[in-house]
């Protein structure tokens, strides 16, 4: 996996706390929060939701709701007070949401998206559900790549790191020599993915957020969230909102 050849680098940032060490101008940032924010965003745009506005504070959520937008989100897994629904990807699949714009506010995911958006980077959303599509997009764009794991309250997260490893492996494979990595966290996450890839559902039993969701009765999303390539949608940040990239 360690490879100095290839014009464009891949790095993995395991925690928003480390983001200042990785932040660049003009990179492609793939933000991931597998349980559940980025899986939910991909599900929403696949379901033809028009856009997702990532928000960080309760006040912002209230602002968008007062303007007539659908409001979604959670804190510590539990549906955000005043929101129309929580953060399960399944909530975003309702036909009634097609064409709507949703303001989404989550504990870690939307905060990481806002962080990545602060520079001059191109920001896209990655999940196992769009793994091949987002990696193919990254290869076509040919920029330096940083995979930003939303983690859990600034801590390392197993499921986000597994995605980072799967994406690093896939981009190097699809890039056919155009990408390299000398980043220890990219190499470590690819090693973790090697251990998990044959049976991610069993492997994820080790993950803290898997058990947090179980305690809350919200773990019906595990299999869906760990299944690869159920959509071709690549959510991309345009201004203050995420829309489906026109990439096909
Ligand atoms: C987050 O942003 O922290 C999450 O996606 C949490 C969740 O929905 O369980």
Image: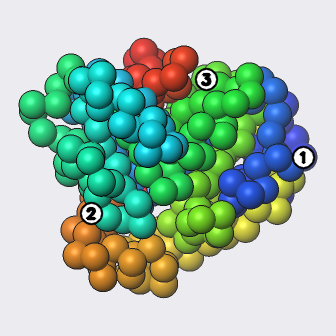
Q: CA distance from mark 2 to mark 3?
A: 31 Å
Q: Which residue is mark 2?
A: 221
Answer left or right for 30 relative to 59. Answer: right
Tell me, for residue 4, which label it has, or none.
Answer: 1
Which corner quadrant holds the C terminus? top left
* Residue 170 shows in this picture: no
In the rendered image, which quarter is residue 23 located in?
top right
The tag earlier along the polypeptide, 1 or 2, is: 1
Sort mark 1 into few (<14), some (14-19) or many (20+) by Cα contacts within 10 Å: few
Q: From what the image shows, is residue 111 above or below residue 116?
A: below
At horizontal 34% and vertical 49% (from top left) the residue drawn is 73
The tag earlier along the polypeptide, 2 or 3, is: 3
At horizontal 48% and vertical 84% (from top left) the residue drawn is 206
Tell me, for residue 140, which label it has, or none.
Answer: 3
Q: Look at the numbered discs 2 and 3 and tell me whether their residues touch, using CB distance below 8 Å.
A: no
Which image quarter has ligand 1?
A: bottom left
User: Residue 152 at what x, y percent from top left?
Assistant: 56, 66
Sort mark 2 into few (<14), some (14-19) or many (20+) by Cα contacts within 10 Å: some
Element marked by disc 2:
helix
User: Residue 14 at what x, y percent from top left?
Assistant: 69, 60
User: Residue 173 at what x, y percent from top left?
Assistant: 63, 44
At horizontal 39% and vertical 38% (from top left) the residue drawn is 61
Q: From what the image shows, is residue 213 above or below residue 70?
A: below
Which corner quadrant holds the N terminus? bottom right
């Amino acid at each position: 996996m360690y490879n100095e050849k290839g014009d464009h680098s891949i790095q993995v940032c395991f925690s928003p706390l480390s983001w200042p060490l990785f932040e660049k101008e003009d990179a492609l940032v793939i933000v991931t929060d597998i349980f559940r924010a980025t899986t939910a965003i991909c599900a929403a745009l696949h379901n033809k939701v028009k856009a997702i506005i990532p928000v960080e504070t309760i006040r912002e959520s209230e602002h968008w709701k007062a303007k007539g937008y659908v409001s979604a989100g959670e804190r510590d897994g539990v549906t955000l007070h005043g929101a129309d629904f929580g953060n399960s990807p399944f909530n975003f699949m309702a036909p009634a949401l097609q064409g709507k714009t949703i303001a989404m506010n989550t504990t870690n995911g939307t905060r990481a998206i806002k962080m990545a958006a602060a520079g001059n980077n191109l920001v896209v959303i990655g999940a196992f559900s769009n793994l091949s599509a987002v990696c193919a997009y990254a290869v076509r764009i040919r920029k330096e790549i940083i995979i930003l794991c939303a983690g859990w309250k600034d801590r390392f997260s197993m499921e986000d790191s597994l995605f980072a490893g799967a994406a690093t492996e896939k981009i190097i494979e699809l890039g056919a020599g155009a990408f390299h990595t000398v980043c220890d966290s990219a190499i470590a996450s690819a090693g973790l993915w090697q251990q998990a890839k044959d049976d991610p559902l069993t492997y994820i039993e080790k993950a803290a957020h898997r058990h947090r969701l179980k305690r809350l009765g919200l773990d019906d999303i595990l299999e869906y969230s760990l299944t690869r390539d159920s959509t071709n949608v690549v959510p991309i940040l345009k201004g203050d909102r995420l829309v489906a990239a026109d990439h096909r």
